[in-house]
Image (tube, helix red, strand yellow):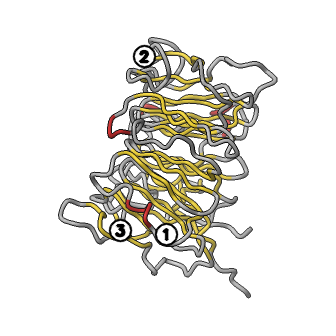
Amino acid sequence: MSQASLLALGSNGSGQLGIGHTNDENSAQECKLLIAGPEDDELWPDLWPSPIRMIKGGGSHTLVLLEDGSLFVSGDISVNRTGLNALTGSISAFKKVPKSVFDGKKVKICSALWENSTVVTEDDEIYTLGLGSKGERGMGEGALGASGRLDRFFPPEEHIIDLASSMAHTVVVLSNGDVHGWGNGRKGQLGEPAGIVWKPRKIERLPFKVVRAVCGREFSYLVGDPSDGHHAILGSDKWNIKSDAPASIPNWQEIAASWGSIFVLDQSGKLHAWGRNDHGQLGVMDHPEPIRRIAAGSEHAMILTRRGAVAFSGWGEHGNCGPRIDPQGDVKEWFQHFPPYVPRKCLKVLGISAGCATSFVWVQPPVVED
């Protein structure tokens, strides 16, 4: 596969878009890499050294995980929320996190909270970074800052197959279908009893084997195998997130969640969604084309159609849904398509991701012949 080029738009006050400055952008801009030079870090164009596996956005920081297990970060790096061992400051381009932060191991999966990051390495060790006043660190009451590795809390024969976080809580899904979580569980999003969960705790009485999870601000959404369509929503019913849910979701392909909405893409390319819609967050559900990928940010959603088009809907005040918004800063009554212009003509869109008023699109640039 050719190396990918990453494009970004949206909120950028801390440099979380990684585009070389800290201004919000409502059109796609090329991300930049900070590469160690002989005297100082140097800003380079963003042809990534390995394909992009996933992108996760926190309150003001962004994580980019590559297929080779390397992790890059941009934005607010204070209180060591990104692994760069910084107490203050921010960076406006993506910088590689040293492997030494994770004891020399490759990263398998990651997630971002408001002021935290969670990382799972290739040997299923969990590292939590940043602040933790509501249990986000998962290291016990009183473990409020810095970074560290969690004590293993599951049998050695099991491994982690999924990891999800929202504002202040995290869940992990194990290969046996069990789910454990920690952080702010005051709305029941981490099971019962409700309250702050300072260390990883198993969510009991789940009626099916869980294979995937996503998190909203006050809920956790858990799904079983696509063949049976089982799903469960733990937490608050704000925005009717529980009461409006379908009885089952058979043949699902992908799931995503914003702070108050849930999105389910089925294998036919049809999108099902419910929950908060006051900013038009669910607007992409009515797109006329079959959909290949979905992504959900804090209050906006993105889709990638099977023909390769990208569209946005929802709250776009910071430019994360493009330049065309209504007086309230929303994209409600139309689909805002990805601008036809990109810094380099791309062969195709490879993936999409959405964070806290941020949007990312990675594309395959053309092969340059000599």
Image position of 332 (left or right of 348): left
Question: How far, Cα to Cα, is label 2 from label 1?
Answer: 39 Å
Residue 190, position as x, y percentages in the image:
49, 23
Q: Residue furthest left?
A: 327
Q: Earlier in the sequence, mark 2 or mark 1?
A: 2
- Amino acid carrying label 2: it is Ala
Q: Work out which quarter of the rendered image holds the N terminus and state it.
A: bottom right
Q: Is residue 232 above or below residue 90?
A: above
- Amino acid carrying label 1: it is Val
Q: Work out which quarter of the rendered image holds the C terminus and state it.
A: bottom right
Residue positioned 62% across, 23% down in the render: 149
Answer whether labels 3 and 2 touch (C-beta < 8 Å).
no
Query: What is the quadrant of residue 171 in the picture?
Result: top right
Image position of 339 (left or right of 213): left
Looking at the rendered image, the disc whose residue lies closer to the viewer, 1 or 3, is 1
Q: Looking at the rendered structure, which numbered label has been put on residue 310? A: 1
Mark 3 lies on residue: 322
Residue positioned 40% across, 42% down in the render: 244
Looking at the rendered image, the disc whose residue lies closer to the viewer, 3 or 2, is 2
Looking at the rendered image, the disc whose residue lies closer to the viewer, 2 or 1, is 2
Question: How far, Cα to Cα, is label 3 from label 2?
Answer: 39 Å
**Dot 2, crowdedness within 10 Å: few (<14), some or many (≥20)?**
some
Mark 2 lies on residue: 194
Answer whether labels 1 and 3 touch (C-beta < 8 Å).
no
Q: Looking at the rendered structure, which numbered label has been put on residue 155? A: none
Residue 56, position as x, y percentages in the image:
52, 47
Residue positioned 59% across, 53% down in the render: 36
Q: Earlier in the sequence, mark 3 or mark 2?
A: 2
Residue 351, position as x, y percentages in the image:
58, 62
| 72, 278: nearer the viewer | 278
